[in-house]
Image: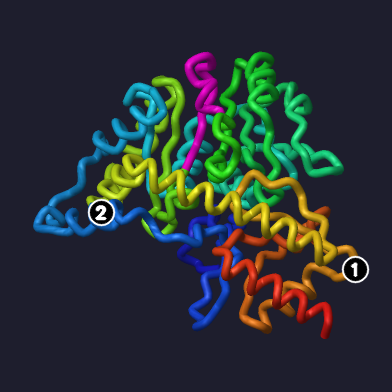
Amino acid sequence: MSKYWSDFVATLDPYTPGEQPAVQNLTKLNTNENPYPPSPRVLAAMQQSINGNVRLYPPPNADKLKQTIADYHQLSVAQVFVGNGSDEVLAHVFNAFFRQSQPILFPDISYSFYPVYCGLYTIDYKTLPLAEDFSLNLDDYARANGGIIFPNPNAPTGRLVGLNAIEKLLQVNSQSVVVVDEAYIDFADTGSSAVALLQRYDNLLVVQTMSKSRSLAGLRIGYAMGSAELIEGLERIKNSFNSYPLGHVQLAAGVAAIEDEDYYQEMRQRVIASRETLTQSLQSLGFDVLPSAANFVFARHNSHGAEALAQALRDKKVIVRHFKKPRIEGFLRITVGSDTENALLIDTLTAIFEG
């Protein structure tokens, strides 16, 4: 607390990001980064972008990146918005669409930064409980609201909502914006993305990122897709905040990442295969593992507490995520690592249980 702060600052409850420890020989399975490097084409494009042009401001409208994303998803450029990671994109989404007289709706178990943004922008909200099996029932959202947002697949559970359920919600909820936050959608079955519904529903906004499936968490490239009128609202917010959210290197990397489809599909399938193997290995050790369509699993052991397990793993330089929150305090969220990292995790857990 400082006497120089605006009174509003003291009311904020800031988000705490996932831990990024500077420790050698660490197996890091806590923040859902991709275990594999970006495409070689991405690295080459980044190198080529580092030249004398960095003395110049980057293109404020990111036209080439927008066009590349639009072409990939068969949209128009007017339907694409880009920003400095999906976190920034989502912050603009909350500011642009959710400052309404009615409360916005989102699941009780989802991203902890949703309430943070509500506090930042003075947005009223109501959380709706996931079912006992941690599935999301969108029928619960057919009520008066100032907007709806949910992650799909959900985080931290990893469970996926099908397109039929999303479309049913859109059909009964046409008076407010529905945001589907798809940070992990590329690890679900092909065709699971709500992008397929964009041409039919003007109030649908889909947010994605290049942090996970395209291995660019360190560059911060996020984007939203929706009707031209929604995108225009985001552009107005962005250009009232920071006209240059993406630099030359980010723009070049983003274009190359989308263009190298073969590499993206190969790495995506590798993570999906590793997820299935990891799930089976955890189950063989006595874990209950929720069905996951993400690059992580959400697991609870039948006889060992999650907090104690997380600490025991940390003591052996393996880091996973534990949430001290109601309903999920018994679970660990475990990032799908490389096959080597996953095997080390299983070996470490086995040693803990036998010790």
Q: Residue furthest right?
A: 303
Q: Is residue 202 left or right of residue 240?
A: right
Q: Tell which tag, 1 or 2, sits nearer the viewer.
A: 1
Q: Which of marks 2 and 1 precedes in the sequence?
A: 2
- Residue range (magenta): 194-208
| Mark carried by residue 249 | 2
Q: Which quarter of the picture shows residue 82?
A: top left
Q: Horizontal and vertical percent for residue 56? A: 13, 51
Picture quadrant where residue 76 is located: top left
| Residue closest to the far left | 52
Eyeballing the image, is 305 above or below 120? below
Q: Secondary structure at mark 1?
A: loop
Asked if residue 11 can be seen in this view, the reply is: no
Q: So how many labels did they put on this image?
A: 2
Point 54% across, 24% down: residue: 204
Q: Can residue 183 be seen in this snapshot?
A: yes
Screen quadrant of the C terminus: bottom right
Using the image, tell me which numbered label, if any, was put on residue 164: none
Q: Amino acid at mark 1?
A: Ser
Q: Which residue is mark 1?
A: 303
Q: Is residue 239 above or below residue 245?
A: above
Q: What secondary structure is marked by label 2?
A: helix
Vertical order, 37 against 195 (above or below):
below
Instruction: Give the amino acid type for the residue marked by disc 2 in the picture.
Output: Val
Q: Quadrant of the N terminus?
A: bottom right
Q: Are marks 1 and 2 in contact (CB under 8 Å)?
A: no
Crowd rating for badge 2 (residues with CA inside 10 Å; few <14, some 14–19, many 20+): many
Counting from the top left corner in percent of width and height, residue 101 is at 63, 27
> Which is more toward the observer, 314 or 342?
342
Q: Residue at x 74, y 57 (%)?
A: 280
Percent x, y of residue 181: 56, 38
Q: Nearer the viewer, residue 86 or 167?
A: 167
